[in-house]
Image: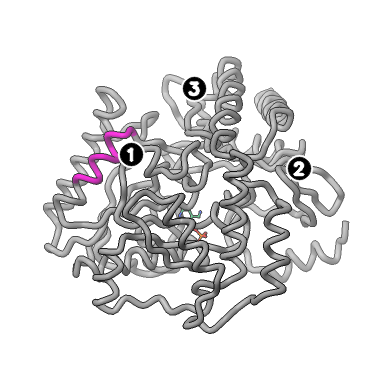
Amino acid sequence: MDEELRAAARDHLVRYGGERFDNLFSHARGAKVWDDEGREILDFTSGQMCATIGHNHPAILEALHRAGEQALHLFSGMVPEAAAQLALRLADDWMPAPLTRSLLINTGSESNEAALRMAKLYTGGYEVIAVGGSWHGVTGAASSVSFASDRKGYGPGVPGVFPIPEPNSYRPWIPGGSDAESALAALELGLRMFDMQSAGAPAAIIVEPVISAGGVLVPPPEYMQALRKAADERGMLLIFDEAQTAFGRIGARTGAEHFGVTPDIMTVSKTLGGGLPLAATITSDAVEARAHERGFTYYTSHVSDPLPAAVGLAVLKTLEEERLIERARDTGAYLRQQLEALQQRYEEIGDVRGLGLLLGVELVKDRSSREAHHELGALTTRRCFELGLSMNIRRRPERGAVWRIAPPLTVNHDEIDRGVAILDQALGESLD
Ligand code: PMP
């Protein structure tokens, strides 16, 4: 442990929100990270939801090395080979038709900025419907359509954003009927409010196929189909933000594939770069052509950069070679079983939900009131870390305290058993 360095982190880094540990971290491999005391920590958050093929996968290291020997960065008018290769792989093997055009950029926030800009140019409108509990990023337009993040200090958001209530099977906005019925009733109400207020300039509906930061909320398929219909009826483009759901985590290539609903624009980020900043805004020829005609630009310093593109290619290849989509399904079912077994033993676990290896565990004071147990969430998450397990708790006032459990797709059963045993111990101790 280097006290001086720890002090440097404390004194010289801007505090950017979220929880921050005192320890510094030096190494990461697979589903494990090590801190400056040499302590091994099991990573059930995949870093920031990015390390789906495991930390420091040899395929990524090899791609980094090779890209380093070729070219790290070029003038944006010079398309690197790796960018053309990645765009081709995405179009041919990963995206649903007709999404065959990729803008390769860096972060999820940026990918949504670009998607919204594209939709506004394509439609000539500016109004955007966004779903409560969503998180689309921290930059201007992306944060304006986010409701699970903190916008303090941003001033006014971009105009024309209409929030609609999120589908939430555990805490439905409009209770009664099946999950699908209550989610559709809430959507209907949201759309009616939009129609009443619209200035006649609709542009887009943006949604995460699993509303992750908002509490790992999985919409019923009917909800996604209804969003598709709502967009078509109003001449809006449907945008899926698949920062977390694309490339295997939910046991499918994409959320679009899982739900059988194709958006007009898909944004992907975290899971494509495997830990490096890489994102893409992906659309059809038709949308790209009209946006281009109307002056679409996204001329950033790092558009189509070769190094992250090479890493993206390595990530896609590894997902296929190691059959990680199937593995996410199988290991996800195993983890879910273990979590449901914990639920049998702890009254405070109100709900276990999710898809593949994107799981949510909702903590409540008692199962009948469903009052969120924020204190237990905070206490147990801290205790887990002390015991060697990194966990993420999503806290929304009135809308739940939810662990998001999302280890790398390469995680094995032993690691899952160990993680669940730590959870069990931390829960037991915190409730004593
Ligand atoms: N969309 C979703 C669904 C996300 O979860 C996030 C990050 N939490 C973002 C967008 C923003 O991505 P980034 O942090 O890379 O800008």
Task: Answer whether labels 2 and 1 touch (C-beta < 8 Å).
Answer: no
**Magenta part, dominant SS:** helix
Residue 70 rendering spot, x and y as whole percentages: 67, 75
When the figure is inspected, residue 274 is found, relative to residue 352, above or below; the finding is below
Q: Is residue 318 magenta?
A: no
* Viewer-nearest of discs 1 and 3: 1
Q: Looking at this view, is 2 or 335 the one in front? A: 335
When the figure is inspected, residue 353 is found, relative to residue 158, above or below; the finding is above
Question: Which residues are drawn in magenta?
Answer: 220-229
* Viewer-nearest of discs 2 and 1: 1
Q: Is residue 222 magenta?
A: yes
Q: Looking at this view, is 20 or 27 the one in front? A: 27
Circle 2 residue: 41
Circle 1 residue: 260
Q: Earlier in the sequence, mark 2 or mark 1?
A: 2
Binning the other alpha carbons within 10 Å of mark 2 as few (below 14), some (14 to 19) or many (20 upward) gives many
User: Is residue 153 left or right of 200 when viewed as pictured?
Assistant: right
Q: Amino acid at mark 1?
A: Gly
Binning the other alpha carbons within 10 Å of mark 3 as few (below 14), some (14 to 19) or many (20 upward) gives some
Circle 3 residue: 366
Q: Is mark 2 within 8 Å of ligand 1?
A: no
Q: Quadrant of residue 202?
A: bottom left
